[in-house]
Amino acid sequence: MPDKYTAVWVSHSSSSDFLRCPQLYYYQNVYKDPKTNHKIKVMAPALALGSAVHEVLESISVLPKDQRFEVSLLDKFHDLWPKFSGKKGGFWDEPTENKYRARGEEMLRRAYNHPGILKNPAVKIQEDLPHYWLSEEEGIILCGKIDWLEYLPDTDSVHIVDFKTGKHEEDESSLQLPIYNLLVTNCQKRQVTKASYWYLETNDELTEKPLPDLEESKKRVLDVALQMKMARQINRFKCPEGESCRYCKPLLAVLEGQGEAIGLDEYGRTDLYILPPKGPNMESVIL
Ligand code: SF4
């Protein structure tokens, strides 16, 4: 078996970075600050909101179904919010933080009032980061955390559910469900028979999606993974847009010294930064 430490690890987020732009992939997934040997990440309000809501829902995913609501989701949210408060969450001012915190509360109120799958039996994959060899020959590992796996007793199968905290719907061409279907199929023993998104900001119910074909999924994901591997081998991560694209600007601003360091992520492997309010992560400024 090839060495896991030299393999190329591919996830939904790293592959979507690569497909958006190889240079963005480089800065978010490959680059390490030579001074700290850590990756870098720019904290922003939407990221803090998504992380906090996901963390609350993840905390109940490990509980037996009749214990999941013994402590209110809002209480859990309030308990962990200090972790994301102020600059730690990318917030420069209180009104913005209050607005994002209120959105998180509303999402969890919705989940509490319309629990649906959250009250049903769930399957929990025991690994912290589920992963398997997508191709041993090519040295490629597919990895990723799945938000929720509902157990469907009638068919002894599983239903993949992904929680969405952003305002935009997942693109139809996204590799998210192909990657999740491959991961769940290969990291536990039950068949996957259903997949859905839950848009927590707007919907009480899940949005069911067609389950991608496994063979076709493997071909699509491997094709992107091989491009990622090649880019790493030849160290070529080209910007296709020149100066006109917003995605890498916050990271480049940090590399130029405009960011303020705010500490390490929870695993101690990524340096977190925040950019000043007039920096490139601002949508607009009123003067
Ligand atoms: S500006 Fe270029 S390098 Fe940066 S994310 Fe956009 S396309 Fe990629």
Image (cartoon, rainbow, N blue to C red):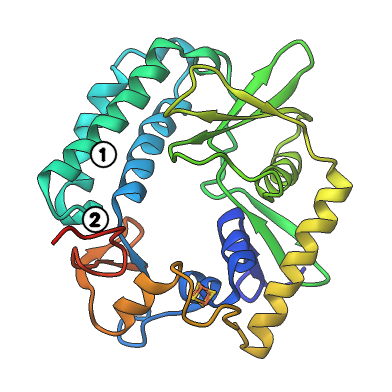
Report the side of 153 relative to 121 (left or right).
Answer: right
Report the side of 268 relative to 26 (left or right).
Answer: left
Q: Is residue 144 above or below residue 27?
A: above
Regarding residue 212, the answer to whether it shows in the image is: yes
**Closer-to-camera residue (180/106):** 106
Work out how far the residue at label 2 is from the one at label 1, CA to CA, in angstroms: 11 Å
Q: Are marks 2 and 1 in contact (CB under 8 Å)?
A: no
Name the amino acid, label 2: Gly
Name the amino acid, label 1: Tyr
Question: SS at mark 1?
Answer: helix
Residue plotted at (36% across, 14% down): 69
Q: Is residue 235 above or below residue 10?
A: below
Q: Is residue 96 above or below residue 268?
A: above
Q: Is residue 281 above or below residue 202?
A: below
Q: Residues within 10 Å of mark 1 (few under 14, many from 20)?
A: some
Residue that badge 2 annotates: 90
Q: Residue 40 placed where, x, y %?
A: 36, 71
Residue plotted at (68% across, 73% down): 228
Quadrant holding the N terminus: bottom right
Which labelled disc corresponds to residue 100?
1
Residue plotted at (56% across, 78% down): 241
Regarding residue 82, the answer to whether it shows in the image is: no
Quadrant holding the C terminus: bottom left
Report the side of 229 relative to 265 (left or right).
Answer: right
Q: Residues within 10 Å of mark 2 (few under 14, many from 20)?
A: many
Q: Residue 151 placed where, x, y %?
A: 65, 20
Which labelled disc corresponds to residue 189?
none
Q: Residue 81 placed where, x, y %?
A: 22, 38
Number of marks in picture: 2
